């Protein structure tokens, strides 16, 4: 019985880690994967979500990439200048 509870807890943790990496709710997926461990396959197959401020879609291949990326890791094409996040230096503004 204790082994079964440990396995379900591990399944929940694995499901929540995968959910975090894909931009989904880790608590919700922890509960679902702990109750139904086969849902780990479902969460692993879910497409990543675009998270405002963290990720964006490549205009060429439509894959999800990090917002700060200058070159897409999937198609190796350089991002248009209007899509590249520019960091402002506080020294330049003064």
Image (tube, rainbow, N blue to C red):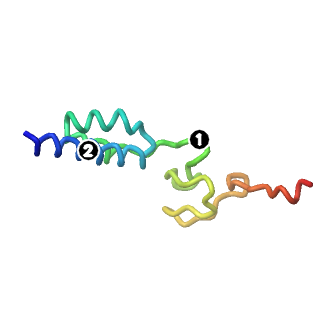
Q: Position of residue 70 (x, y in %)?
A: 63, 62
The answer for how far apart the CA atoms under marks 2 and 1 are is 25 Å
- What mark, if any, has residue 52 been given in the picture? 1
Residue at the limit of the structure toward the front, as seen here: 2
Depth order, front residue of 56/19:
19
**Tag shown at residue 3:** none
- Where is residue 44? Give x, y as percent: 31, 47
Residue projecting furthest to the right: 94
Question: What residue is drawn where x is 29% and y is 48%?
Answer: 14
Are the residues flagged by discs 2 and 1 in contact, CB closer than 8 Å? Answer: no
Percent position of residue 56, x then y: 57, 48
Q: Secondary structure at mark 2?
A: helix
Q: Which residue is mark 2?
A: 40
Q: Is residue 14 left or right of residue 4?
A: right
Between residue 45 and residue 7, name the one nearer to us: 7
Quadrant in which the C terminus is drawn: bottom right
Farthest-out residue, left: 1
């Amino acid at each position: 019985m204790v082994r079964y509870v440990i396995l379900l807890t591990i399944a929940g943790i694995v499901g929540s880690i995968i959910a975090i990496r894909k931009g989904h709710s880790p608590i919700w997926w922890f509960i679902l994967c702990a109750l139904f461990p086969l849902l780990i396959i479902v969460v692993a197959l879910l497409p990543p979500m675009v998270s405002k401020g963290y990720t964006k879609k490549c205009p060429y291949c439509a894959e999800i990439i990090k917002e700060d990326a200058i070159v897409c890791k999937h198609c190796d094409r350089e991002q248009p200048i209007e899509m590249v996040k520019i960091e402002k230096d506080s020294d330049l503004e003064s």
